[in-house]
Amino acid sequence: MLKVVEISNLTVQYPDVKALDDVSFVINQGDFLGIIGPNGAGKSTLFDSMLGLNTKYKGTIKFFGENIKKSKHYLKEIGYVPQKPIFEKNFPVTVNDVVSMGLRNESDKNKIDEILQQLWIHELSNRRIGELSGGQQQRVFIAKALVNNPKILILDEPVTGIDQQSIELFYSILRELNSKQKITIIWSSHDLDAVNQLANHVACLNRTLFFHGESEKFFSNDKLIKQYSEASMQEHMHHH
Amino acid sequence: MSLEILTYSFMHRALISGIAIAILCSVVGLFLVLRRYSLFGDAIAHSSFGGIALGLLAGVYPLWTAYGVSIVSALIITKIKDRYNISGDASIAVLLSSGIAVGLVIIGFSGGFTIDIFSFLFGSILLVSVDDTILILSLTGVILIVILLLYRQILYSTFNEEQAKVSGIPVEKINYLIVFMAGITVVTSIQLVGVLLISALFVIPNLTAIMYGKGFKQTAIISMSFSVFSVVVGILISYVFDITPAGTIVLLSIGLLAGTMVIKSAGLLSKN
């Protein structure tokens, strides 16, 4: 089994709080990994570190066997869908423009049509991005992430504020990308049921990693689920 | 309107330079507006005032010193803004006032050269020389080529800096490049509308075009067309009625913006 990501002893210390404490795990090629954890558990910090947006960490992160502090080449193999893509509502770009931004090689223009069709947004290609619903925008950003044929897709809580129908469609797209196109998926989510249905591996994060393994093992272990729920609940109370 | 004015060679130079500047300002300005940096052109223009005064004092062609001072101060202020985490509008205020302050002190030292300064404050497009015209055309050409070559990188880092970074685009370098190009564009355009009205050329045609265009290229082309229209018609009208070209050009583009807003609120344009 090919290791695509190796995280060893990752610790991120912010001035007032330790966001991640000695986190280590490995992601193999073809894994569909669901990362779960309450708000403030360090999911976004983990992603920022993996994507090179946060470089102030202790420990090592390797993609395809290479330390990401040494080379940025790995970014070419990654498609990233942020939690809520921030842009000016009136920004004058069409769906086609947005997906083109992701395209590294100008000569692959046909790829855009192909990917828009695959995600059921082909008929929107000449609409302005700001005119679309949250679910449609989501699919546009997935299209942008996929247009370079990435080996790994990273999604940060991608269904926040999106209608149920779009979520169903989105999940079926993810399942297909993982099973048919063999794309490794790293996906953070609040939705335990969805993780149970989709992911084949689970990482349970709350500053430290308190479970990582096959999702069956997690979801068949009531004690773990209870632990997770209690931790989330405490965090929830803490925040309100 | 008599067609005779189109036969004067100073009018040819004015129109050719004016069209080049109109296109340049609308393209560079579109990126600034979308980055919420609308007043940056204004700030660079004010800092160039210091450069112009320096040139007049030293006996150097004032636009050369203006290029130097504007570009350097724009890059420095961008660096300071990033280093000390100062907001965009505050850094613009610093740049804007320090340029004027330097200019005023230098003018004070020299005992005043008010007539020359006046043409830089309000523009003097009808006075551009052949050399000026060649310079304006070359700089416009170079900047447009750079933008076309780096189109995807510039657009992407304007649209979403973080995602552009994750895609491996050198976002910081692109930001400095835009500031550098804005510096050149502003000083080049001073001859058309002067220091005080520069930001109108950067901002107004783009605000108008954003209400019409769907995609990015379409919006840029619409903005260029509005900008060229205002400049050409503005120069001709101002000559015929003997009024200031800078004011006329800016009022025309404001007219186009106001007209578009009326059309839009009447529901004749699709809502974005």
Image (cartoon, coloured by chain):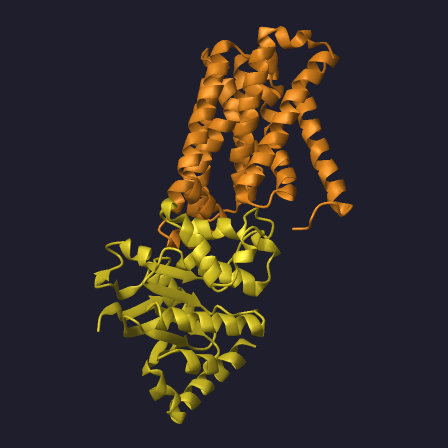
Chain colours: A yellow, B orange
Q: Residue at x 67, y 27 (%)?
A: B250
Q: Quadrant of residue B212?
A: top right
Q: Residue at x 29, y 57 (%)?
A: A74
Q: Position of residue A152 (x, y in %)?
A: 34, 64
Question: Which residue appears farthest toward the right when viewing the image?
Answer: B266
Q: Residue at x 52, y 10 (%)?
A: B129
Q: Position of residue B148 (x, y in %)?
A: 43, 35
Q: Looking at this view, is A80 or A175 the one in front?
A: A175
Q: Is residue B60 above or below residue B94?
A: above
* Labels in figure, total: 0
Q: Quadrant of residue A144?
A: bottom left
Locate the N terminus of chain A by quadrant.
bottom left
Q: Position of residue A23 (x, y in %)?
A: 30, 73
Locate the C terminus of chain A by quadrant.
bottom right
Task: Give the side of residue B46 with respect to residue B268, left or right.
Answer: left
Q: Looking at this view, is B220 or A25 the one in front?
A: B220
Q: Quadrant of residue A20?
A: bottom left
Q: Is residue B264 above or below residue B201?
A: below
Q: Is residue A207 visible?
A: no
Task: Give the side of residue B260 with respect to residue B166, left or right.
Answer: right
Task: Give the side of residue A12 with respect to residue B7, left or right.
Answer: left
Q: Is residue B80 above or below residue A86?
A: above
Q: Is residue B166 visible?
A: yes
Q: Residue at x 41, y 48 (%)?
A: A109
